[in-house]
Amino acid sequence: MSEAKKVLYVEDTFENRMLIRRILQADGFIVLEAESAHHALQVLETETPDLILMDINMPDMDGYTLTQQLRGIPRLGQIPIIALTANVMRGDRERTLAAGCDGYIQKPIDVDTFTDQLNRYLER
């Protein structure tokens, strides 16, 4: 990767943020974190990431609603938003895509292929 890519990870669980931060930083990514949807909106006032990882189940606002809000902000419209979620029931993937996510990765992640998955979205 020639230039470090910036990823915003929106996730309310500290341990999940820590794991993803370690994996991505080890592969040269710059990682921004938000522990809630409202915090993500604050971060996005001053930062423009290359990719957003979106937890779906959060206490203040779910990832579906936040994704829909972000899709309404012109400068963020082309940023890939990838759902990173434990929601694996029938229809969950389709619901995330219908909300405006560009992709869907199930938790628990495969640490050996995770950054390759993200790089495929960044190359589009």
Image (cartoon, rainbow, N blue to C red):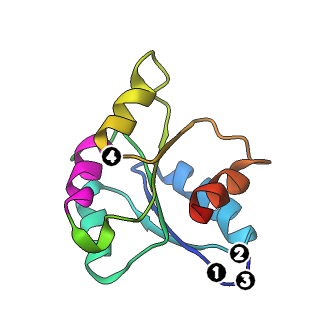
Identify the mark nearer the N-term, 2 or 4: 2
Identified by mark 2, the residue type is Gly
Q: Characterize the local packing of mark 1: few (<14), some (14-19) or many (20 or more) Cα atoms within 10 angstroms.
A: few
Identify the mark nearer the N-term, 1 or 4: 1
Q: Say what secondary structure mark 4 lies in.
A: loop
Nearer to us in this view, 30 or 21 = 30
Mark seen at residue 84:
none
Residue at label 1?
Answer: 4
**CA separation in Å, label 1 and label 2:** 6 Å
Residue at label 2?
Answer: 28
**Image quarter hosting the N terminus:** bottom right
Identified by mark 3, the residue type is Ser
Q: Position of residue 38 (x, y in %)?
A: 22, 60
> What range of the chain is rendered magenta?
63-72
**CA separation in Å, label 1 and label 4:** 25 Å
Identify the mark nearer the N-term, 1 or 2: 1
Residue at label 3?
Answer: 2
Q: Is residue 64 magenta?
A: yes
Q: Is residue 111 magenta?
A: no
Q: Say what secondary structure mark 1 lies in.
A: loop
The residue shown at (45%, 59%) is 80
Hey, which quadrant is residue 75 in on the image?
A: bottom left
Hey, which quadrant is residue 64 in on the image?
A: top left
Mark seen at residue 100:
4
Identify the mark nearer the N-term, 3 or 4: 3
Identify the mark nearer the N-term, 3 or 2: 3
Q: Position of residue 86 (x, y in %)?
A: 50, 31
User: Are discs 1 and 2 less than 8 Å apart at CB?
Assistant: yes
Identified by mark 4, the residue type is Gly
Side of 24 relative to 79 (left or right): right
For discs 2 and 4, the disc positioned in front in the rendered view: 4
**CA separation in Å, label 3 and label 4:** 28 Å
